[in-house]
Image: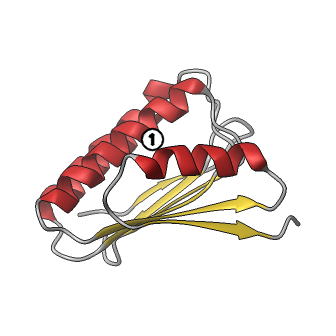
């Protein structure tokens, strides 16, 4: 399976999914004009990867702002990870937020409440 890479824009995060390591990284603000169009290839890639992956899958997020559509799309990705976890795959999420960004912290905590796989929330120093 090929790696997935999408460059960041002012309104969409950088996306990097390494098919060899199982690490998906999404970094940056997420409020693209057409959120579902932006996330469609990511969700498709995650589905395909989970159907073929044997190793651990780690989703690393550092997204200081998410619009409503982005939250919905992340929920879809989390649902895929939850299904994979329930079927015995090893998955985890590491959500990093900038210290002092209580909104990002609250969003991460709300997501983690409904999931059974490891969901780590880490504060990072603002640059």
76 relative to 97 in the view: left or right: left
Q: Which residue is rendered at x = 88% and y = 66% of the image?
A: 127
* Displayed quadrant of residue 61: bottom right
Q: x%, y% of residue 72? A: 45, 30
Which is nearer the eye, 113 or 6?
Answer: 113
Residue 116 appears at what percent x and percent y? 31, 58
- In the rendered image, residue 2, in percent from the top left (x then y), is placed at 30, 62
Secondary structure beneath disc 1? helix
**Can residue 91 be seen from the camera position used here?**
yes
> Looking at this view, is 32 or 5 the one in front?
32
Residue density around tag 1, few if under 14, some if 14–19, many if 20 or more, within 10 Å:
some
Could you say where residue 30 lies in the image, as x and y percent from the top left?
63, 38
Residue visible at 44% across and 26% down in the picture: 36
Numbered marks: total:
1
Residue 28 visible here:
no
In the displayed structure, would residue 124 be above or below residue 68? below
The quadrant of the image that shows the N terminus is: bottom left
Q: Which residue is mark 1?
A: 74
Which colouring convention does the figure follow? secondary structure
Side of 85 relative to 24 (left or right): left
Q: Is residue 124 above or below residue 38?
A: below
**Residue that protrudes farthest toward the front in the picture:** 113
Of all residues shown, which one is farthest toward the top? Answer: 34
- Of the pair 7 and 39, the residue shown nearer to us: 39
Q: Residue furthest right?
A: 127
Which residue occupies 25% across, 72% down? 90
């Amino acid at each position: 399976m090929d790696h997935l890479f999408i460059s960041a824009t002012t309104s969409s995060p950088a996306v990097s999914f390494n098919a060899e390591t199982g690490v998906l990284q999404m970094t940056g603000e997420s409020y693209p004009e057409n959120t579902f169009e932006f996330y469609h290839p990511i969700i498709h890639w995650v589905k395909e990867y989970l159907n073929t992956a044997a190793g651990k899958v780690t989703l690393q997020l550092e997204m200081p702002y998410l619009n409503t559509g982005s939250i919905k799309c992340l929920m879809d990705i989390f649902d895929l990870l939850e299904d994979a976890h329930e079927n015995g795959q090893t998955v985890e999420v590491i959500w990093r937020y900038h210290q002092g960004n209580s909104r990002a912290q609250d969003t991460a905590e709300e997501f983690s409440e409904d999931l059974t796989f490891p969901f780590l929330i880490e504060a990072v120093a603002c640059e």
